[in-house]
Image (tube, rainbow, N blue to C red):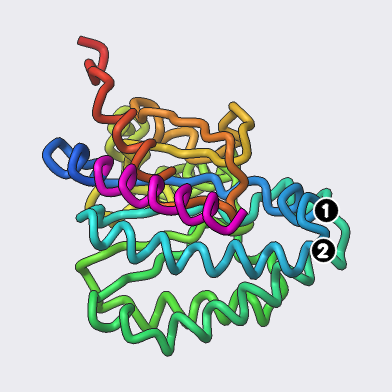
Amino acid sequence: MIERILRLAGAYSLYEKWLERTVMGREMPQHLALILDGNRRWARMHGLSTAQAYRYGADKVEELLRWCLDLGIRVVTLYVLSVENIMRRPPEELEDLYNVLLEKVERFLAEELVWKEKVRFKIIGRLNYLPPKVAESLLKLEEATKGHDRFHLNIAVAYGGRAEIVDAVKKLLKQVMRGEIHPDEVDEQVIEKNLYTNGLPKPDPDLVIRTSGEERISNFLLWQIAYSELVFLDVYWPAFRRIDLLRAIRTYQQRVRRYGA
């Protein structure tokens, strides 16, 4: 049994190296977005609590950060918690997730890699839906890294794509009422300036990955993913490997992006 595991591990290592050589010679996505799905199902499969699964998933984010830095991907957006999750999930489960978020913020603030690689955090979503201590902690991380510019890690929490568009429309209406803009001047660029992702070097993802085998977008970046490539992987987020990331990038590179042409 041990010999079989070692042989399998060796095969995975060779496959990973081959995949890396394959993707590194081609166009890399500049902005990668991920829907981190499958934590609870992974927990049930392994006889663990939801809180434990969230911690495994949070640790996986640190691994992902290192992988993306190595591959030269400079903008990453993670869908961590939706507006619908907050409305529909049990309070005790949300509390587990909030505790993990608080722990992870403190870890990122102390993480040498964040400062060495100039990782900038941006929190997108309706933070007023979160407990004050959680919102304040996330904003603390955003504020502490606002001077960084080499890598952008966006955390979508208390987020909904429709909510983002609604909030953008409200901002625009206020601008119109104040006479700052005429309705005829509203175009795609004006709307984009009022979205949560305004200010990113590349607001629109090139590649969106969803883990867990589900094949839907679930209200994620509805405006921004108009021309994104979508890849759905049959692996739960805590079990996500570097091989899975490389496979998704290879799929992205094999597609012909026409942008309506």
Identify which amino acid the numbered label 1 is placed on: Arg
Q: How many labels, in total?
A: 2
> Label 2 is placed on what type of residue?
Glu
Residue ID at (39%, 45%) = 11
Q: Quadrant of residue 188?
A: top left
The reply to whether callout 2 and callout 1 are in contact (CB within 8 Å) is: yes
Q: Secondary structure at mark 1?
A: loop
Q: Which mark is residue 47?
A: none
- Highlighted range, magenta: 1-19
**Considering only vertical position in the picture, is 209 above or below 43?**
above
Q: Tell me the residue at 32%/40% (across/down).
A: 204
Residue sitting at the far bottom: 110
Label 2, on which residue?
93
- Residue 243, position in %: x, y? 39, 46
Left or right placement of residue 94 versus residue 17 in this view: right
**Residue nearer the viewer, 98 or 171:** 98
Q: CA distance from mark 2 to mark 1?
A: 7 Å
Q: Residues within 10 Å of mark 2 (few under 14, many from 20)?
A: some
100 is higher (above) or lower (below) than 260: below
Q: Measured along the vertical axis of the image, is residue 211 above or below residue 2?
A: above
Place residue 97 in its image quadrant: bottom right
Residue that badge 1 annotates: 89
Q: Residue furthest top?
A: 261
